[in-house]
Amino acid sequence: MNDLWVSVAMLGVSVLLSELIRSAARVLPIDYRIYLREAASTFQLCCCTHELKLLGDSAQLELSYGLALTYTVTLVHLVTFQDATCNPTAALESVCRGTRSLRAAGVVIMLQFAAAVAAQSYVASAWSQGLSDIHLQQKSTDFRCFDPLGGTLLEAAVVELACAFVLQAACMHAHKLDERLQVHFIAAVVTAAVYAGGGISGAMFNPVLAFSIQFPCSGHTYLEYCFVYWLGPVLGKQWTGVHSL
């Protein structure tokens, strides 16, 4: 249980640090404010997911604890992210819709990936302090990550596609609910997707998040991870757009 509370504290610190950056961004011009919020929110998403994955892999939490923590953290993300998407596919979609220039989308994507790399360094530094047993275990393996796939490459890619499709569909229809219920609905969908697909692919359904969490893992090549974690979510998001026409 001590491991759990240390991880919860680390989640809180990650959110607080990101929120401070978002608050500081309010004094900047609107363009720079958007970029800084995107970077801070992506950093928060990756840091929290690193810690949740470590808990799930090492601490063997009871299912009820794991799902409750996933739901709660997702809810916090939705409330704090403001207009940040933390997802390269969303930036590319905004270009297709004409709401953002290609150059602006490129800057957003670059900042997202930079934040994903910064999150890797941040959690490694935090884990190196050895505040809990699972952090010490991770330090003893030199922060290495092993094969994250619980199925074949094709199965994992299909899971990522399906998760991205379901989440995008949920986001498109959430406005039909009472405004107070919308974030709870999305958080519940994300939690259900993680529960259903986590054992096969890890249920990232976000290219930049997967880049931070799964790409450093051994077991598969870079191109194989691209197939699963980049092509799968992009096709899932596009498939949702086709079905919405």
Image (tube, grey):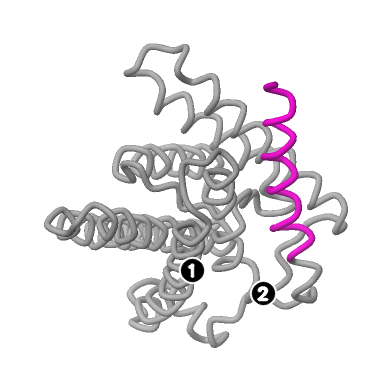
Give the residues drawn in magenta, as a range: 226-245
Residue in the image at 45% along x and 47% along y:
85
Q: Which mark is residue 142?
A: none
- Residue 238: say if magenta: yes
Residue in the image at 31% along x and 42% along y:
82
**Figure quadrant of the C terminus:** top right
**Figure quadrant of the N terminus:** bottom left
**Residue receiving disc 1:** 110
The amino acid type, in three-letter code, at marker 2 is Cys
Residue in the image at 69% along x and 31% along y:
240
Tell me: residue 132, above or below residue 236.
Answer: below
- Picture quarter containing residue 162? top right
Q: Where is residue 167 in the image (x, y as percent from the top left)?
A: 59, 34
Q: Position of residue 22 (x, y in %)?
A: 23, 55
Q: How many labels does the image show?
A: 2
Q: Which secondary structure dominates the residues rendered in magenta?
A: helix
